[in-house]
Image (spheres, helix red, strand yellow):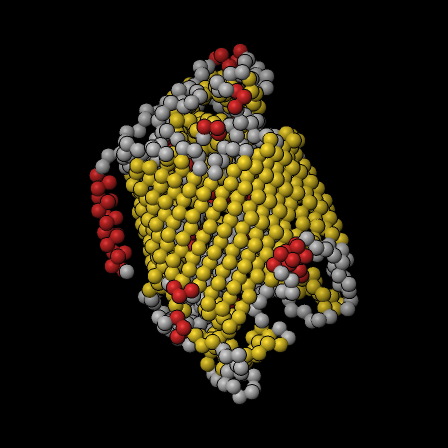
Amino acid sequence: MQLTTRLFLALMACFSVIYAQANGDPEPTKKTYFTQRLASEIKFDGIPDEAAWDAVQWGGDFVQYQPNDGAAPHQQTNFKILYDDKYLYIAYRAHDSEPDSIIRWMSRRDEFPGDWVEINIDSYHDQRTAFSFTISASGVRGDEFVSNNGNDWDESWNPIWFAKSNIDDKGWTAEVKIPFSQLRYGNEPDKVWGIQVMRHILRKAERSTWQHIPQNGQGWVSRFGELHGLKDVPSQRQIEIAPYGVAKLETYKKEAGNPFADGRDGTLSMGVDGKVAVTSDLILDFTINPDFGQVEADPSQVRIDGFQNFFQERRPFFIESRNIFNYQLTGSAAEGEYDSDLLFYSRRIGSPPHKQPNITDIEYLKQPERSSILGAAKFSGKTKDGWSIGILESITQREKALIDNEGDRRKELVEPLTSYFVGRVQKDIKEGNTIIGGMLTAVNREHGLDDLLHRSAYTGGLDFQQFWKNRAWVFTARGVFSQVNGSKEAINLTQTAFEHLFQRPGAKHVEVDPNKTSLLGHGGTIKLAKFGGKQGKLGQLFKFETGVTWRSPELEMNDIGFQLTADEINHFTWAGYHFQRQFSVFRSLRLNYNHWSRWDFGGRYLYQAFNTNAHANFKSNWEIGTGFTWNPLDISNNALRGGSPLRRPAGFGHFAYVSTDFRKKFAANLNFFNGWGYDKTVSSNDVGLYLQAQPNNAFSLNFSPGFTRYHRKQDQYVDQTSYNGESRYIVSEVNQKTLRLTLRLNYNITPDLTIQYYGQPFITRPLYRNFGYVVDPLNKDYDARFHRFASTQVSFSDGEYSVDENNDGQTDYRFQNPDFNFVQFRSNLVLRWEYIAGSEFYLVWSQSNTPGSAFSDLSSGLGNSLLDNAFGDEARNIFLVKLMYRFLK
């Protein structure tokens, strides 16, 4: 199969030569809009009928972006722009010959409901970043920070600005007022900014733009039109101080005898968030005693393969400006699991304590749920010279658990005082066609848990991107290093951890060194891609990406980053043939091919897979897609948790989905996946349904049930023990069923007053049986890899299995019953009111299982367990009131 890979790479090289020689379609001429200073007052009611607007001309002549690239839109759009010393003013006239058909759905901020118009402003004029402001026909605002030339849109950016809309017999209108303090720009007297205005008509599934941007190229911001006429706009020094107070009450089931669980806890707390503009383009954000009580709960996840779970960041301080701190090691179109590896993973800051104290049967424990963040600050922005700068520093508190022994209490350290630092710089050269950058992180901990945690951990990286042929082609190179330092015990834990497993037999290129006090590792990615070029008559365009990514055995980024595993060299290739214009019954059509290969640093060939998939969007706005994967080779260095590499079954995978018309008040998506190994050695079946309902303009509902069935015939890891001086890696058959339900409700009383509900019941149950041990892990004959215990060799009593391997009537070793039942119910009910621009009031009720009820017995059925545990009397209720007032200058 390596020959196949080489042949395909050779074909890619041939395609590269052919397409590199081809000229792309010419870029449309850039449009220019001329603005004027505001000469008289604007009422600001969403109706631009004041005389002040007559000072400038209407911009117009919009062109379709989707679905018919370059065609005239069904309805035209006009806009005007004015300014004064403090604000940029925009007026919209969205013409519509059928005003009653305008879709005026409401939602919470940043969900972009119904019909809307937005303006993107490249005030840096760096042709890579922009600020986006969206107003819907219903008056709902949305805002995003655009980076990486339109490849990244950050909805977490929430500036302070003002907008109103109005529907009339000609369509709808809107007025927008944006404080200059919310933008970043240079100090030149005559400014030229990049701008783009886009309109979305939901019933036509149509987007049209003022500056035509054909879909055959790469890039968004670099292809904007220009705004001229901004003269002598003074620099704005943004200062925002937002103190807040929080009252919190928790109720839960009282536990007899436990002095820490009397059924009720209450707290009052205060804190402050702030933003200070150090210059007109660099901002200092800070938070003292931050509160994240109104943040939506994480979705439930359980993995039995040993890999850690990845959770999205949801805390406002960390998600704002996160684009600057993003350093994804791969970032591939041909995604693999390695694609989630990050140099900076902000969920490490304020995570649960690393140590869990051991207590006796008569002791009770009060353990902090997470490490408290004492304070955090970040300095970020972009200069007019093209330098992007980001610096973040955060301190988490020393945490101690409180242990009660019949009235005698003691404290035990569970997390040391810790400092987290992140620094990031990038430089745009040649209008963003060349980008160089670097990143450095540092974690430093005080003494106290030296046998468990690294005293210090440092990671860094350098990155380079080069675009050419109107950004149709891009070469990317990223390199990273890591160094962790600590005691012999801590470094030994790292060497033998799941991500590294230096102790595994047969791995001659690694070994455990018990005297080491540091580890130095490296990783990186090199890739070549083509995303643009000359289109055919149907908008057909050939795209591809190919490259290699590696993680050395010693690479360790998990103190402040996210890394699934080390000791890998991965090759990936993706190629696509995409039809981007309407033809026949299609709005668009995409055909794709992928393949992946993997080796470890000892040269062992670990993995190979081939995939093809197709996705069609029809003129009816229904969508379908399907894909097929063949996986002829899979050897895992992690499956036995430190044992020898284990050959996993070869097999196939297939997915498919269908989506109905999302423009309708009721829409649905049905998707499924089936995977199976040869000779029924492994199977995975997943079905999911997404239902969306918008019965009226103010109310929306999303409901997502799903069910997964997972089976492995014999190679599921259970435990490790020893027998007659030899290691025994216990494995078994496993059958796991998972049921998940997610419900979201949103009701808008006004665009700024919403009631939102999120609920997720979740249950998973793996059942293990037919135990045995590994005898020949790499044998190509599946059954020859394992010895399955006879019924006379294994017995069960009091929650553990006893094994009499030599049948002499004596127990040779034992292992715990691995069966478990994980049940969880998480929900949030939030009333959010932005009573003044930037100032908010929250009422929150959240509910979850108490920690002791998550893992329960197996005496009831799947449905009964879900009802009894998720909706029973074990729930923990949290009631929270938060008031925040933002002072602006």
Specify the quadrant that holds the C terminus.
top right
Across and down, in percent, residue 823 comes to 62, 57
Question: Residue 20 lies in what quarter of the image?
Answer: top left
Residue 839: image quadrant is: top right
Q: Is residue 114 visible?
A: yes
- Left-right relation of 448 to 438: right
Q: Nearer the viewer, residue 759 or 375?
A: 759
Whether 105 is drawn above or below 502: the answer is above
Count the labels in the image: 0
- The percent position of residue 486, horizontal first and vertical second, equals 50, 65
658 or 355, which is in the foreground?
658
Answer above or below: position of 45 versus 391.
above
Location of the N terminus by quadrant is: bottom left
Residue at 36% over, 25% down: 71
| Residue nearest the observer in this picture, 282 or 837 | 837
Q: Which residue is painted at 59% across and 54% down in the image? A: 762
Residue 581 at x, y = what percent?
Answer: 34, 33
Quadrant location of residue 767?
Answer: bottom right
* Residue placed most toward the observer, 656 or 241: 656
Taking the image as shown, residue 357 lies to the left or right of residue 255, namely: left
Say which residue appears at 67% left-offset and 61% top-offset.
852
- The answer to whether any part of residue 280 appears in the image is no
In screen coordinates, is 558 left or right of 350?
left
Tell me what residue is drawn at x 55 percent, y 27 percent: 104
Q: Is residue 191 above or below residue 711?
A: above
Q: Position of residue 534 (x, y in %)?
A: 27, 35
Q: Determine whether, in the image, residue 479 is placed left or right of residue 135.
A: left
